[in-house]
């Protein structure tokens, strides 16, 4: 629930920023006059991207959150798009999960007088790759240049964890704990479903977006689910 609240706060901040830096601003004096209609080349300057007659578009940018990623999006037409993200997961959010996973890596050759105790761990690498298929629709009744979208995709994750542990051997009535390290390579994958919105009413060909995903592990820990998501910017061309 706290993460959902954070995403809600980010959503509000992004909408405020979008309205603050949008293309059409009215001064108190100009608010008494009608906005002139423009067309053709001038219209493209007012809203330089996502004209129905000019699809397809492409977008390249970055996303902050879980994960931090470089992102690419192909806008096939007004409603359908494909996206790909590559980057690094926010490993700190998974500390409890990785700590609780430690027992599954213990050797099965320990005798009843031997034990291994978890001390700490460090994630040295945590890369991910994700592809997504998206359906999007206009939400201009809420704000000019706003689009909502939903979709599904597939995520691959590769994580390297270094565990520190204490080994105790009481076989000879001795309990002189010995420090040790265990390196684990975790590769897994699974489906994702997501919802988000994208705002593009800027004076530059840029779009800002925020999205929330649900990842389900299908390999190492089948059924494990976790919310992910973030905010980002793309340059659209």
Image: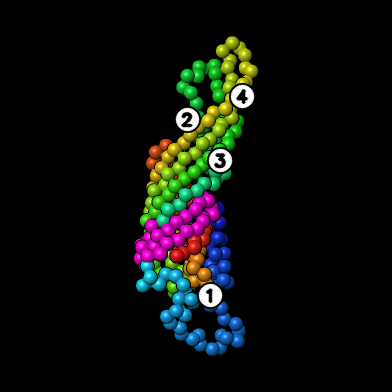
Front disc: 1 or 4: 1
Residue 118's quadrant in the figure?
top right
Q: Where is mark 4, residue-wise?
A: 179
Q: Residue at x 49, y 77 (%)?
A: 46
Q: Residues within 10 Å of mark 1 (few under 14, many from 20)?
A: some
Magenta region: 56-82
Q: Where is mark 3, residue-wise?
A: 95
Cα separation, mark 4 vs mark 3, equals 21 Å
Q: Where is mark 2, residue-wise?
A: 104
Is tag 3's residue or tag 2's residue first in the polypeptide sequence?
3
Is tag 4's residue or tag 3's residue first in the polypeptide sequence?
3
Cα separation, mark 3 vs mark 2, equals 16 Å
Is tag 2's residue or tag 1's residue first in the polypeptide sequence?
1
Residue 33's quadrant in the figure?
bottom right
Front disc: 4 or 3: 4
Q: Is residue 32 visible?
A: yes
Is tag 1's residue or tag 4's residue first in the polypeptide sequence?
1
Q: Where is mark 1, residue-wise?
A: 23
Cα separation, mark 2 vs mark 1, equals 55 Å
Question: Is 177 left, or right, of 187 in this rendering?
Answer: right
Q: Residue at x 48, y 51 (%)?
A: 228
Secondary element at image label 2: helix
Front disc: 2 or 4: 4
């Amino acid at each position: 629930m706290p993460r959902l609240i954070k995403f809600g706060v980010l959503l509000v901040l992004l909408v405020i920023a979008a309205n603050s830096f949008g293309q059409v601003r009215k001064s108190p004096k100009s608010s008494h006059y009608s906005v002139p209609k423009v067309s053709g080349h001038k219209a493209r300057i007012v809203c330089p991207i996502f004209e129905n007659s000019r699809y397809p578009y492409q977008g390249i940018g970055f996303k902050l959150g879980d994960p931090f990623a470089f992102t690419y999006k192909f806008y096939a037409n007004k409603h359908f798009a494909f996206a790909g993200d590559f980057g690094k997961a926010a490993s700190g959010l998974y500390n409890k999960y990785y700590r609780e996973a430690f027992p599954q890596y213990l050797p099965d050759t320990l005798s009843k007088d031997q034990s291994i105790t978890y001390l700490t761990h460090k994630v040295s690498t945590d890369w991910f790759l994700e592809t997504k298929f998206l359906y999007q629709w206009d939400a201009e009744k809420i704000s000019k240049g706003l689009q909502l979208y939903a979709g599904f995709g597939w995520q691959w994750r590769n994580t390297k964890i270094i565990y520190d542990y204490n080994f105790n051997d009481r076989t000879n009535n001795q309990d002189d704990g010995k420090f040790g390290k265990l390196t684990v390579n975790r590769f897994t994958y699974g489906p994702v479903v997501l919802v988000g919105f994208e705002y593009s009413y800027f004076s530059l060909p840029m779009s800002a977006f925020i999205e929330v995903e649900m990842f389900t592990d299908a390999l190492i820990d089948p059924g494990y689910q976790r919310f992910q998501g973030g905010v980002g910017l793309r340059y659209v061309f």
